[in-house]
Amino acid sequence: MNKVIDGKLIAAEMRKEIASDVQELVARTVVPGLAVVLVGEDPASRVYVSMKEKACADTGIYSVEHKLSAETTEAELLTLIAELNNDVRIDGILVQLPLPKQIDESRVLEAISPSKDVDGFHPYNVGRLVTGNPLFQPCTPYGVMKMLEYTGVDLAGKHVVVVGRSNIVGKPVALMCLAKHATVTICHSRTANLIEEVRRADVVIAAVGRPEMIKGDWIKPGAVVIDVGVNRVGEKKLVGDVDYAGALERARAITPVPGGVGPMTITMLLYNTVESAKRRADKAGC
């Protein structure tokens, strides 16, 4: 096992497999389709959307972007989502967050058809994840699980400590680890004795959103560390939620920031879109 878990390399390998799956679907007359909706001019969102477009083009996925003004009303956005739900060319719908303040994010996410919810945020898909029968799994935690799989980490019987309790990463990744027969502890910034909890972990998944909050000497020797955090320090430097240099000395394997979990998020979005297209092909008998 390489000590540094290279997310770029794993993502590249997965994208080759995704491109192959797309070719097989095209041979069955089905082209996977992803619709991305961007409301407003948030610079980070625009960069992220452009990265998604390039990733789709590289793997052969049909993509369409809907750019809406920051003044778009909730009703207008819901109308567009209804149209995309009924568009047979579209297998996945992604509404880029955050949305302008006049739009209720929960109402918008719930309007997306669960069968096209490739972000895995619809309450229906969250419920299926909780009950152990997922349809779509959220992209970032799903990427974490794929990284562990590619690295050869068997979670069965292991103690996983998740630091972070968000609906986007912390909670879903804890459920995914439970499904792999791990014993899971969910911690957060207000957990008493957090240091002791982390020191007991065979696998640490950090997703708390605080730069280098988890110190190197908190890591049990031989543990695996997955750092989901991306925090900007100063004008240019990006760091994770873990003190990378300190943890590197003790961990059996660790993800860097950047170049760790980040590349996996868009990859899993592509993966979910292709899985949705496979269901469409099977349903149509293609």
Image (cartoon, grey):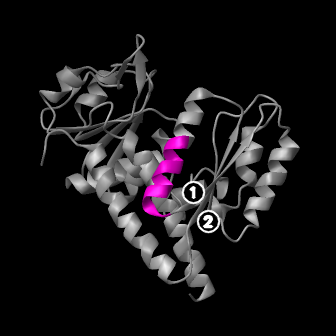
Question: Which residue is farthest top?
Answer: 234
Which label belongs to residue 118?
1
Q: Quadrant of the C terminus?
A: bottom right
Where is residue 36? Give x, y as percent: 64, 50
Task: Pick whichever, 141 or 46, lies toward us.
Answer: 46
Which label is found at residue 186? none
Amino acid found under the numbered disc labelled 2: Asp
Which SS class for mark 1? loop
Q: Nearer the viewer, residue 193 or 111?
A: 111
Cα separation, mark 1 vs mark 2, equals 8 Å
- Looking at the image, can residue 217 be seen? yes
The residue range painted magenta reads: 50-60
The residue under label 1 is which amino acid type?
Val
Image point 50% across, 68% down: which residue? 275
Residue 43 at what x, y percent from top left? 59, 27
Residue placed under numbered mark 2 in the picture: 91
Give me the residue at 71% from left, 56% from top: 112
Image-based side of 159 in relation to 273, left or right: left
